[in-house]
Amino acid sequence: MERIVLPRKFDYNESIRIRDKLKKRYPFLVCHSIGKSVCSRDITAYSLGNYKNTVLFAGAFHAQEWLTGLVLLRFLERICESLKARKELSGVDICASLMTKGITIIPCINPDGVEIVLNGAESAGKLSGFVKDISRNDLSKWNANCNGVDINHNFNAGWETLREMETRAGILGPSVRQYGGFAPHSEPETQALVRFCERNHIDHAFAIHSQGEEIYWSYGDNTPENSLTMANIFSVCSGYELVENDSLASHGGFKDWFIEYFMRSAFTIEIGKGENPLPVSQLDEIYERIEEMLVVGAII
Ligand SMILES: [Zn+2]
């Protein structure tokens, strides 16, 4: 059967094309919006299996890292294929697992940022002048949403400490990257994800970023004891290395907030190696390397 998730630039139109085709081919797939971005784009979630106890995978927090969204959609497509054909995926009976544990995939947390990177500042609508100003017309480093806030610096976990670090690094206001906002959870994209996590039981969560072939697994004293064991298993499955937080990536991230707030496991996976944005031609290679880790992550 023809693949739906292809190595193409992952802009908003492409995400809608993929969504509609997946829904049509796999009617059992539950597709819903968890909220809207600053420019009113839908932040789409896909769910399978038991909602009451789900594992969450979220990608494209950072605009340059849009390939993570395609990788997650490829994972979703592969799960759907397995369910339809009642076949194993990476040696795992995913049908049986979904009886007890659900999977939720949110491929793109930052649709406006991705749109800016792929289709230019004009895609920020009323904010396009602002986007041009703060980027000085250079979008090659743009990672933020269209308010110039880095969503992965906007979560309420060590946010004030991170703010001090940003200030020391000369990041004082809206910026192409690494500005955490005027308050934690100030951004609609952050709020949408927080609300979703509060309203549903998420057993554990994965934030997919690029690049580095690394797995971050800890945040402070609330890191569950089994997180390191799980991370070691993921490392064996993928060959990715375990690392601990440092510098400007130490606080304010989704994984950090999830661990601190729920006292449950969360992981940041840095996929691929090279310079962001990773070339879309690497989709198959990156995906194949991590499929087993994602499958194990979903059922563990
Ligand atoms: Zn990132």
Image: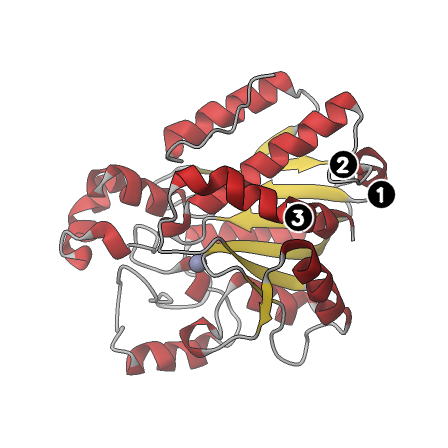
SS at circle 2: loop
Amino acid beneath label 3: Leu
Residue at x-position 48% and y-position 40%: 283
Residue at x-position 73% and y-position 28%: 82
Q: Nearer the viewer, mark 3 or mark 1?
A: 3
Q: Is mark 1 within 8 Å of ligand 1?
A: no
Q: Is residue 146 visible?
A: yes
Instruction: Name the mark on residue 49.
Output: 2
Q: Is mark 2 within 8 Å of ligand 1?
A: no
Instruction: Name the mark on residue 138.
Output: none
Q: Is residue 244 above or below residue 64?
A: below
Neighbourhood count class around disc 1 (C-alpha, 10 Å): few under 14, some 14–19, many 20 upward: some
Q: Earlier in the sequence, mark 2 or mark 3?
A: 2
Q: Quadrant of residue 86?
A: top right
**Quadrant position of ligand 1:** bottom left
Residue 123 in percent (x, y) is at 26, 38
Residue nearest the observer in this picture, 203 or 79: 79
Instruction: Give the Cα separation between the discs numbered 3 and 1.
Output: 17 Å
Neighbourhood count class around disc 2 (C-alpha, 10 Å): few under 14, some 14–19, many 20 upward: many
Instruction: Give the Cα separation between the discs numbered 2 and 1.
Output: 7 Å
SS at circle 1: helix
Residue at x-position 33% and y-position 76%: 166
Provide the residue designation for mark 1.
100
Q: Nearer the viewer, mark 2 or mark 3?
A: 3
Instruction: Give the Cα separation between the discs numbered 2 and 3.
Output: 16 Å
Is residue 222 found left or right of 33 in the rendered image?
Answer: right
Residue 117 in percent (x, y) is at 29, 45
Q: Earlier in the sequence, mark 2 or mark 1?
A: 2
Provide the residue designation for mark 3.
294
Residue at x-position 79% and y-position 33%: 88
